[in-house]
Image: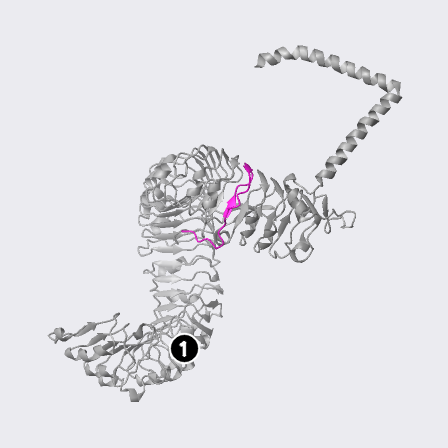
Amino acid sequence: MTFEGLSSLQNLEFLDLSSNNFNNSIIPFLHIFPSLKSLNLARNGLESDIQDIKIIRNLSSLFLDDNNGDGRNSIQLELLGVYPFLKTLSLMDNSFKGGIFAQEMGNFSSVEELSLDDSSLDEESFKSLRALPSLKFLSMQGLNADLPSQGLCELKHLQKLDMSNNDLSGTLPSCLANLTSLQLLDLSSNHFIGNISLSPLGTLTSMHTLDLSSNLFQIPISLLPFFNLSKLKHLDCHENEIYADIDVPTLTPKFQLRTLYLSGQGDGGVFPKFFYYQHKLEYVDMGNIKMKGEFPHWLIRNNTKLHTLYLPNCSLSGPLQLPIHSHVHFSDLDISDNYFNGSIPTEIGVCFPSLNSLDLSGNGLTGGIPSSFGKMSQLKELDLSSNHLSGIIPQELIVGCSSLYELILSNNSLHGQIFPKQATCKELILLLLDGNQFTGSIPYSISNCTMLEMLDVSYNRLFGSIPGWIGNITSLDILDLSENSFFGNLPSSFVPPRISQVYLSKNRLQGPLTNAFYGCSELTILDLSHNDFTKRIPEWIGNFSTLTYLLLGYNRLEGEIPIQLCHLFKLRLVDFSNNNLSGPVPPCISLLRYPYQPNIYGRYPKDSMAQPLEVTTKNALRYFQGIILSLMSGLDLSCNNLTGEIPVEIGNLDKIQLLNLSHNKLTGLIPQSFSNLKQIESLDLSYNNLNGKIPQLTQLYFLAVFSVAHNNLSGKTPEMVAQFGTFENSSYEGNPFLCGPPLSKSCSSSSIMPRVSEEDRKDHKKDGGFIDMYAFYVSFMISYAIMLLTMAAVLYINPYWRRAWFYMIELSLTNLYYFLVDNIPFVFRCY
């Protein structure tokens, strides 16, 4: 490309040639723009020697970021000092060694803004910063370097310093106190340590914005080290260690903060008193800091511009008191997971008419939901879950809060109908009413919630049939109706085609699984356990290519396990237990080996799974949810009528944690491949017809539950080492040919069965054991012949027994005759 055709642009001041493939040959052509003030050559292929760029004398802004495209180019800055007007210089994504701003490189006294983000600098490079006496803004994010004090601390005119998102560590150098003109300092996302009271930050009286977040500082909750920073307006200290210090009543802060982020960890003692002197606060976040005291209603009253207050998990207690006057600017309030008690103030809707988000969850609030919520016409998010609220959902809440898109009332004692009949709820996305005492059926008014993505009414007292119109809510992603009393058959195609999670467990649903879920191509979780479903598992189950958790246990399903199950390559947990299934265990069942990441949006309040899943493991029912469930992998086919041998392919599921095949009619050997189940925690093969020896399983170090009881196993029990040393007699009982500890039967020569060759093992496999059948037949015939001869000899020798025998024969024949005479006509009549 040539630039001669652009020579007429004599007044061109801004030229952006970034993100191309230009090399140094382009630089001589730039003289045709004599008025050029800003030049951007970032992300090209310039080589290190760029001194020809000196021909552009009026340049005030120069961008040379990431040339050669690898972040490793070493730009040489010779003779850049010929630009007396250069104010802005960007050298991001480069690699420098030595004094890049040394005097021999030129005079950089005019540079005011410098960006070295994502660059590599050595100690000499830092020292050379002293050659920038006019520097006001310095950005050094993502550095691959340590933080030497020399050079940096000599920039006395520096106003903004951004050193965030590095791996810098250690304490802050004391020479930072020299930066008396500093107005903005960002040290966030590093590894700095030390008590902030001993740092030089308290001397930087020009400071306007200070960001210390995501470090390892110790910060007193009183903020005493910052009391002299009279210009400080924005302070961010979240994700550090906050501690309680001794309050000094005679000292008051000189600052008037606008925003304060102090959330993190630690015990802050009492609610900090510096808040009493603040009157211009707009945003306060002090979540997860343990503090004593009541709700600071005075803080809202004293700061009329305060719009956001976050105090979750702060150990605050007492009744919930609100300012008596209307606070028109207040928009967000989160005081969840505290110890507030008493009722929600009836005037809450009057106090906060402009509220957008309110979270009172996880407290001890009692009483009803005030009808004044209906005055919050701008309310979008309301969470009152995990309290002790009672009563009904007020009509005013649903009608008045027309902008509501998240309503969470879970785990209370609310009753009545779950939703008013007059509800429109066109904006509602989340409706979580689980864990209450709601009764009645699902009202038709919910069909108006056309944008609903998650509906959870589990753990209530709802009844009636499941309405088919649920399938018309096309945005529905998660449906949870479990733990109610819904009955009847499932409607045909009653869920939207793009739904991902369905929970219907522990109801009274019945009938076959005909076409209820047909076409749900994005289904990941299907829980229909603990119902009364019958007939076969439908073959269209194989269409759910994204299915990960399939729970059909505790029903009355019958027939064989469909082979289409083998087409589901993302399965992690399968539970078909306590049914009437028959036939063999499919050898092709595959369980996903990697953690499942469900497609749930971040605004969903429950971690990863809407409903905890119930799994039988370690001899008890256990509930798994969230991250724990995402790591769970298991197969439960217990309590059925399955026959045949255990497929050796099951041993290839080397990431499985749960395998339960107990209470079936399985035969044959325990596969040796089970030794590959390195992650197994619970293995139950009890109450079957398995035979042979127990394979070597002592290398299964995570095994916590193991049972092969009540089979036909023989030989010696596994050596009592590692985890097998913890298994008791109950793990092996009911196997008469097993011996060895922990069983009381010792493995003496008389108690051990004869060794069977592999050839004999194969010959007698289909007979279900290792008995010598030829010897069995011969011994049986001999015993039968001896019995007949013994009877004949007794009758020949003893006349009394001979007469008794013939009399018995005569009596039996007479009874048989009259039986046939009386019953043959009846038999003919039945046909």
> Could you say which is closer to the camera, residue 466 or residue 731?
731
The type of residue carrying mark 1 is Ala
Q: Which residues are magenta?
A: 573-599
Residue 67 lies, in percent from the top left, at: 30, 75
The rendered magenta stretch, by its main secondary structure, is classed as loop
Q: Quarter of the image for the N terminus: give it.
A: bottom left
- Choose top left, top right, bottom left or bottom right for residue 367: top left
Residue 295 lies, in percent from the top left, at: 43, 57
Tell me the residue at 79%/32% (across/down): 783
Which residue position is annotated with label 1? 145
Tell me the residue at 46%/33% (across/down): 512
Q: Secondary structure at mark 1?
A: loop
In the picture, measured across the screen, residue 147 lies left or right of residue 580, that is: left
Residue 38 lies, in percent from the top left, at: 21, 75
Residue 656 visible in the shown view = no
Asked if residue 588 is among those painted magenta in the image, a careful observer would answer yes
> Could you say which is closer to the camera, residue 39 or residue 157?
39
Crowd rating for badge 1 (residues with CA inside 10 Å; few <14, some 14–19, many 20+): some
